[in-house]
Amino acid sequence: MATMICTVCCMVSVDCSERQCMDRMDIDDNDFPTPTQQTQGARTSVGSELVSPDGRRHYDEEGVRKAVRDFLVAIGEDPNREGLLDTPDRIARAGKELFGGLYQSPKEPLSRRFKTDTDEMVLVRNIELYSVCEHHLMPFLGVAHIAYIPSNGMVVGLSKLARLVEVYARRPQVQERLTKQIADALMEELDARGCLVVIDCEHLCMSMRGIKKSQARTTTSAVRGIMKNAATRAEAMQLICRE
Ligand SMILES: Nc1nc2c(ncn2[C@@H]2O[C@H](COP(=O)(O)OP(=O)(O)OP(=O)(O)O)[C@@H](O)[C@H]2O)c(=O)[nH]1
Ligand SMILES: [Zn+2]
């Protein structure tokens, strides 16, 4: 029996259609490991290959497994002890989620537009965000707030804004670039008349190592188009900052 795998969210599921993922392909059930394979030590996962939108790079699961084994040896651990035996494979699979955005395009969430009869501001606040800082490969986490002003009434589903955040957060990142990329995608792919993106995060590389300032929060913003207008920007900021 054929199974559907979504090349957007990588979920193997019939539920995928409910997630409104747009780009799916048929694969064969035999491409997936059996339950037995999944629970064996030092296992090898067989699954969907992640390929970047331009087709130039793919996610090298075996390469990640080898690198993690080498890393464990380098820190003085024994990759063959029981607790670590599956770790290279776990990280190889986790990496597909954490860095899956490298294999997605902002076109995916933003292409399913629909028309409304208003060009007023749309704002989604407190979109949970987990990313990985490119300097230390440690998590940074917090929230994104996205406001935009549609043109000709063309909007996207609200969940697509959160999906857009995922596309750019699931990569080695710096917070400034993440903020800018989201704003640029809204202008280019959604053809918004203006947008404001505000991101507020804790960086674990500042909390659990180095300077160890766990209360520090970093806020970045990017403003584009007619949202640069002082009154419009102030309105958006007021809506974002309300309790
Ligand atoms: N601007 C910016 N800096 C970041 C981000 N994530 C991590 N950093 C910073 O990247 C910098 C890397 O500094 P380096 O001096 O190269 O590395 P380091 O010796 O580990 O630095 P310390 O964290 O100060 O110990 C640190 O100051 C981090 O706080 C980010 O999203 N944006
Ligand atoms: Zn860092």
Image (cartoon, rainbow, N blue to C red):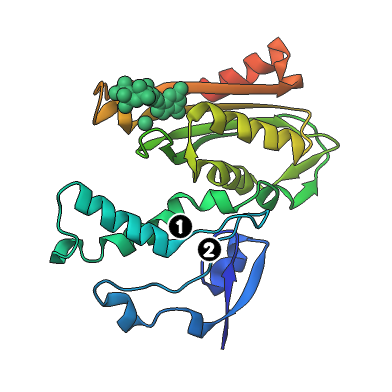
109 vs 53, nearest the viewer? 53
Relative placement, left or right, of 165 versus 32 is right
Q: Mark 2: which amino acid?
A: Cys
56 vs 239, nearest the viewer? 56
Name the residue: 49% across, 44% down: 171
Farthest residue, direction right: 152
Q: Are marks 1 and 2 in contact (CB under 8 Å)?
A: yes
Q: Which residue is mark 2?
A: 10
128 versus 73 height, above or below? above
Mark nearer the viewer, 1 or 2: 1
Find residue 23 and report its image quarter. bottom right
Relative placement, left or right, of 220 versus 141 is right
Of labels 1 and 2, earlier in sequence is 2
How many C-alpha atoms fall within 10 Å of the one at disc 2: few (<14), some, or many (≥20)? Answer: some
237 versus 187 height, above or below? above
Q: Mark 1: which amino acid?
A: Lys
155 versus 21 height, above or below? above
What SS does tag 1 mark? helix
What SS does tag 2 mark? loop
User: How far from the left and from the top, in percent, is residue 227?
Assistant: 71, 20
Taking the image in four quarters, ligand 1 sits in the one at top left
Q: Is residue 24 visible?
A: yes
User: How far from the left and from the top, in percent, is residue 85?
Assistant: 21, 66
Does mark 1 have its CB less than 8 Å from ligand 2? no
Relative placement, left or right, of 89 versus 176 is left
Relative placement, left or right, of 24 versus 33 is right
Farthest residue, direction top: 230
User: How far from the left and from the top, in percent, is residue 123?
Assistant: 62, 32
**Where residue 96 is drawn, which disc sits there?**
1
